[in-house]
Image (cartoon, grey):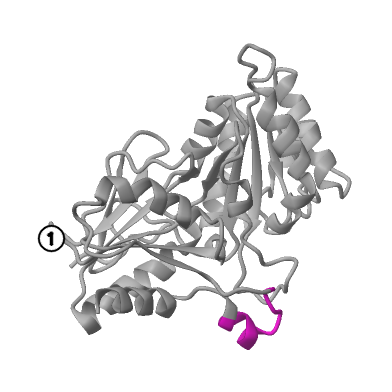
C-alpha cells in the first residue's frame, strides 16, 4: 500500500503561510516578541518575514496585553493584524484585551465593527518546559462572545486557515501545539499505510481520518490538532492489538464548535484534549453532540483530559500529567468493555 506522503514540517508550512498572507495583502501586520530577523521567533515560525516585509513585522516589548491591544487597535483602524504570544500560557496576561476589548468591539456599538485580528499561541507540553510554559489554556477562551478559537492541525492548510480568520473580520485565537511544529503535514489524503483522510464541511472544515471500505466504527475520536498524532497512534494500537475500529475527527475551529459534514459514525464517542478537566472544550463538544446522537450512542461520551495539577519540568513527572496515546487507548477500551 502507499506510504505516507513526505512533506514539509508544520513550522515550515506555517512560516510559508505567513509569507504568503503578507505578500498577498499589504494591509497585514505581524507583531510579537523577538519575531524579527535574525532570531525569527522562539520557534522560528516568523523567520524571514521582517527581512522581506520590513516595518510591517515588528518586535515588541514584553507585554502581552500591549501586544494584543496594539494588534486590536491596528485591526480597528482598518488594517489586519497577526499577533504572536510567545507561549500560550501568557495569553492570560492579555485576557482583558481579548475579553473586554477585541471580543466585544465587533458588536457593542450597535453596528458591526470589523476586527480582523489573529492571536497565535504556541501551546502544550511534552518538552520539559515546566509549569508556566507548557499549558494548553484553550478552555479558558471557550464561550467568550465574539471570539473564535481555532487550533492548527497537520491536515489543514495554514494559509487558508489564516486567511479564513482574517476574512471573518472577527478576533480569532489560533493555538499551535509546540510538538506539532516538528511533525510533517499530511497531504493527498494519505496518513499512513492504514489510514486515509479527507477534509469535509465548509472552511475551516473538519479532517476525517478513516479506514477505506469501513462504514461502521466502534468509536469516533474527536481531538484538536495538537492531539492528532497521539490519537492516530491510539487508533493504530486499538485496531491491530484489540480489533477495535476507530475513526478520527479533527476540527480546525474549536469554538464555535461545528462538525458540519462529519457526523460521528462510531457507536461510542471519545473526546481527548490537553489541559485539565472541568469546563473544557471536550465538555462543550459532548453537550453539543449528546442531544443529536442520543438515540444511537451505546454509552455516555467519554472525556479525556490531563491530570489535575501543575505540569512538572522533569520529563518522568510531566508524562504522568499529560495525555498520551496510551491514555486515549485505555479510555476507549474501558468505555467499550
In magenta stretch: residue 185: no
Q: Is residue 184 left or right of residue 235?
A: right
Residue 167: x and y in percent read 53, 26
- The local crowd at label 1, few if under 14, some if 14 to 19, many if 20 or more residues have their Cα within 10 Å, is few
What segment carries the magenta color? 310-320
Q: Residue at x 39, y 40 (%)?
A: 258
Most distant residue in the top direction: 111
Residue 325: x and y in percent read 42, 75
Q: Does the image show residue 294? A: yes
Q: Is residue 284 left or right of residue 208?
A: right
Q: Is residue 300 left or right of residue 317?
A: left
Asked where in the image residue 26 lies, by quadrant, the reply is top right
Q: Residue at x 57, y 29 (%)?
A: 166
Does 311 appear above or below 31?
below
Residue 296: x and y in percent read 19, 55
Residue that carries the numbered disc 1 in the rendered image: 214
Does 76 appear above or below 57?
above
Q: Residue at x 59, y 51 (%)?
A: 175
Quadrant containing the C terminus is bottom left
Quadrant containing the N terminus is bottom left
In magenta stretch: residue 319: yes
Asked where in the image residue 128 lies, by quadrant, the reply is bottom right
Most distant residue in the right direction: 61
Amino acid at each position: 500500500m502507499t506510504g505516507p506522503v513526505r512533506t514539509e514540517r508544520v513550522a515550515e508550512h506555517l512560516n510559508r503561510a505567513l509569507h504568503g498572507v503578507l505578500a498577498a495583502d499589504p494591509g497585514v501586520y505581524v507583531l510579537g516578541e523577538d519575531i524579527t530577523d535574525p532570531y525569527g521567533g522562539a520557534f522560528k515560525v516568523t523567520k524571514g518575514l521582517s527581512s522581506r516585509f520590513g516595518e510591517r513585522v515588528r518586535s515588541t516589548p514584553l507585554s502581552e496585553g500591549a501586544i494584543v491591544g496594539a494588534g486590536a487597535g491596528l485591526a480597528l483602524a482598518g488594517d489586519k493584524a497577526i499577533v504572536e504570544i510567545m507561549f500560550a500560557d501568557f495569553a492570560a496576561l492579555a485576557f482583558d484585551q481579548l475579553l473586554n476589548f477585541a471580543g466585544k468591539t465587533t458588536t457593542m456599538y450597535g453596528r458591526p465593527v470589523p476586527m480582523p485580528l489573529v492571536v497565535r499561541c504556541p501551546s502544550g507540553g511534552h518538552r520539559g518546559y515546566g509549569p508556566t510554559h507548557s499549558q494548553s489554556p484553550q478552555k479558558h477562551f471557550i464561550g467568550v462572545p465574539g471570539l473564535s478559537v481555532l487550533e492548527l492541525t497537520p491536515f489543514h492548510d495554514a494559509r487558508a486557515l489564516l486567511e479564513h480568520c482574517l476574512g471573518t473580520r472577527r478576533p480569532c485565537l489560533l493555538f499551535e501545539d509546540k510538538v506539532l511544529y516538528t511533525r510533517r503535514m499530511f497531504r493527498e489524503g494519505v496518513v499512513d499505510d492504514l489510514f486515509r483522510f479527507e477534509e469535509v464541511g465548509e472552511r475551516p472544515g473538519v479532517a476525517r481520518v478513516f479506514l477505506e471500505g469501513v462504514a461502521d466504527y466502534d468509536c469516533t475520536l474527536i481531538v484538536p490538532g495538537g492531539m492528532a498524532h497521539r490519537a492516530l497512534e491510539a487508533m493504530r494500537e486499538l485496531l491491530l492489538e484489540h480489533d477495535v475500529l476507530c475513526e478520527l475527527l479533527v476540527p480546525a475551529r474549536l469554538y464555535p464548535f461545528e462538525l458540519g459534514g462529519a457526523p460521528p459514525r462510531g457507536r461510542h464517542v471519545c473526546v481527548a484534549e490537553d489541559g485539565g478537566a472541568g469546563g473544557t472544550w471536550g465538555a462543550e463538544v459532548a453537550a453539543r453532540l449528546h442531544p443529536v446522537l442520543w438515540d444511537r450512542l451505546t454509552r455516555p461520551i467519554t472525556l479525556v483530559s490531563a491530570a489535575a495539577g501543575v505540569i512538572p519540568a522533569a520529563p518522568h513527572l510531566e508524562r504522568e500529567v499529560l495525555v498520551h496515546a496510551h491514555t486515549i487507548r485505555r479510555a476507549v477500551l474501558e468505555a467499550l468493555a
